[in-house]
Image (cartoon, helix red, strand yellow):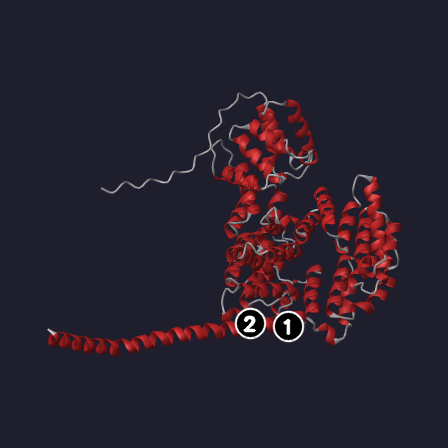
Amino acid sequence: MLVLQSRRTSRLRRRLTILGLILLPVAGYFGWQFTRDHLLYRYRAWKQEKALGRARELIAKKDPAGAKLELDIALDAVPGSPEAMRVAADFFEMVGAAQAVSIRRQIVDFAPESIPDRLAMVATALRFHDLNAAHDALTGFTPAQLAQPAVLRAHLSYALATGNRPVADGLFDRLASLATPDDDMKALHALLLRQHPDRQKSAAANQELETLAQNPRFALSVNRTLFSEAVAARNYPDARRYAALVSADPAATFADQLNEANLQVLVDKAPFEGVFARLAPRAAASGPAAAEFVRWLIIQNKSAEAARWLAGIPATLATTPDVGGVRADLAVATRDWDRFGQLIEEGAWGPIPPEVARLALAAHVVGTRSASVRKEVWDEAVAAAGTNLNTYRVLLRIAGAWQWEAETESLLWAVLQVDPGQAWAHATLLGVYRKRGDGKKMLEVMSVLKGAAPTSTTYRHDWALLSLLISPGPEWDEPKTIAKEVYLADPTNPNYATTYAFALTQAGKPEDARAVLEKLPVAEREYPLRAPYMSYVYGFCRRPAECNKYAALVGNAPVLREERLLVQQGVDALTRPLSRPLPEPKPRATPKTAPKT
C-alpha cells in the first residue's frame, strides 16, 4: 500500500509540475498586464496633474492659447476627470465663453454634495446671465447648508441679479447676523434699496452709496449706475454730474467717455465737430476703441465721418480684427452690399468657409426676385455649415444685417440641433416667441431644454406650465405630476406654487388650489404676470370679487394669449356647473413573484 501511495504521489507531482509550467506564462502575462495598466494609469494621472498645474498658472497669467494646450493634454490623459473639468470651466470663464456654465453643471451632477462646486456653478451662471442654471444650482443646497455665509451670499447674489428686493432684504439681514457682509454686497444691496417704496430705507441706501462712492474701489461702478438711473429718469443735471465723475475716474473706459458724449450731443446739443475732435485721438489708441468709436458714429448717423476717419488711421490699427469687423458694420449701415460681401468672405465677422459665405451672399442677391429661391439657397448655406457653431454665429449676424426674421429663427433651431446646451440660443428664441405671444413655440423650445438638462428643476417647471397652458385637460398627466413635484421640493417659490395651483384647478380641485395660493405674500399674489392664474383659480372657486379683482390687475401686462384666455375662462366659470375632479394616478404596484412549486 505504501508503494502504491508513493507512485500516486509522484504522478501527482509530475502533473502539478506540468500544470505549473503551463500556467506560469499565463500568470506572468496577466501579472505584467496588471502592472503595466497600473503604471500607465499612474503615469497618466501624473501627466494630467502636471498639465493642470501649468494650465492654472497660464490661466492666472491670462494666456488662453497656452492654457488651452495644457488643458487638452490633461483632458486627453484622464478623460472625464472632475479636476480637469474644473480647470476647463475656469478656462472658458477666462475667455468669456458661456460653455463654462454647462461644464459647471456636469461637475455638480458628478459631485452633487460638493458645496464649492455648487457655489462655483451659481457664480458662473450669474456671470453669463443664465438665471435658470443659477436657480437650479441653488435649489441643491440643503437647509443645514443655508446657515453657511457663503451659501447665503450665493442666494443673495441671485436675488440681487433678479431684482427680488423682498428676498434680498431678508437674506442681507440674515447674512449680517452671521457675518459682516462685504462691501460688494453692500453696494449691490444699496443700489437695489434705492428704489424701495419706504422713503426711510431708500434714503439710508442713498447714504450708504455716498459712503461707498468715496472708496476708489466702488466709486466707478456706483457712479456708472447712478448715471444710468439719472438718464433713465431724464434727470439731466445729475446725469451730467455723474458722467463727469465717471469720465474723470482713472479706471474709466472709452465707452464711459462715449456715454458722456451722447449726453453732450443729444441733450446739450453741443457742436458735433468739437466732440468728434476730442474723441478721435482717444479712439486711435487701440483696435477695440476704434471699433467702439465707429459704431458710435454709425448710431449718430455719421457714417460718412466714420468712413473718412477709418481711411486716415495708421495701418497697424486698420489691420486689427476689431477694425475689420466694424468695417462690415459700416458697410451694412451704408447698404454697400458688394463691400459687405467682400469683407465677410475675408472673415471680418469671423472665420467662415468660402462655400458657406458665397451661398449666403447669393441668397441675398436672388432674394430680391424670389423669396422661395432665397430660402432654398439660404438652406443650402446652413447645410454647408454642418455642425460648426462659429459658422452659425457668423450666419446669424448676416441674417440680422439683412433683417431676415424667418432665417434667423431657423438658424437658432439649427444651433440647438447641433448643441442643445447653447443657452443663448434658447434665450433668444424664447424672447422672440414671448414677444409674439406664441406659447406653442415656447413649449417646443422648453422641450429641447428639458431634454438637454432633465434634472433641471426650472426647465421641468417651465415645460410643465407651458404644457398645461397649451394642452389643458382634467387628467392628472405628466405636466401636473411635475408641477406637484417641483412645488413640494420648494413650496415657498411663488412661480411653483402658481403652477401647482393651476394644475389643481384644471384637475377639478380649485379649493385646494386656493389654499396653495393664499400662502403667498400679498405682493406676490398681486403681481400682474401672476394675475391671470389668480383670476382663473378664483373663478373656479366661485369667488367673483377676487376673480374680477385679479382680472383687472392683468391690464396691459405682457402675457401670452393663452394666459389672457385664462381670465375669460375664470369669469365664465363663475356660473358654470361644477365638474367632478379626476383622482391622481396611483403609483404602479410592483408585481409579486409567484411562489416556486
Picture coordinates of residue 595, whole percent (x, y): 27, 41
Q: Amino acid at mark 2?
A: Glu
Q: Which residue is depicted at the point 76% across and 75% down?
A: 314
Q: Earlier in the sequence, mark 2 or mark 1?
A: 2
* Discs 2, 1 touching: Cβ within 8 Å: no
255 vs 508, nearest the viewer: 508
Q: Quadrant of residue 571?
A: top right
Q: x, y percentage for residue 132?
A: 61, 49
Q: Please name the residue shown 61% across and 43% down the image.
A: 436
Is residue 370 visible in the rendered image? The answer is no
Q: CA distance from mark 2 to mark 1?
A: 14 Å
For residue 49, the mark is: 2
Q: Which residue is mark 1?
A: 58
Q: Secondary structure at mark 2?
A: helix
Badge 1 density bin: few <14, some 14–19, many ≥20, Cα 10 Å: some
Amino acid type, label 1: Leu
Question: Dot 1 lies on which element?
Answer: helix
Q: Looking at the picture, tell me which residue is in the foreground, 119 or 251.
A: 119
Q: Position of residue 214 (x, y in %)?
A: 86, 57
Where, quadrant-wise, is the C terminus in this rendering?
A: top left
Question: In terms of depth relative to the viewer, which is nearer, 267 or 508?
Answer: 508
Q: What is the x, y in percent for residue 311?
A: 76, 71
Could you tell whether 532 is left or right of 269 in the image?
A: left
| Drawn side of residue 271 relative to residue 400, left or right | right
Query: Residue shown at 73%/44% (left/top)?
Result: 169
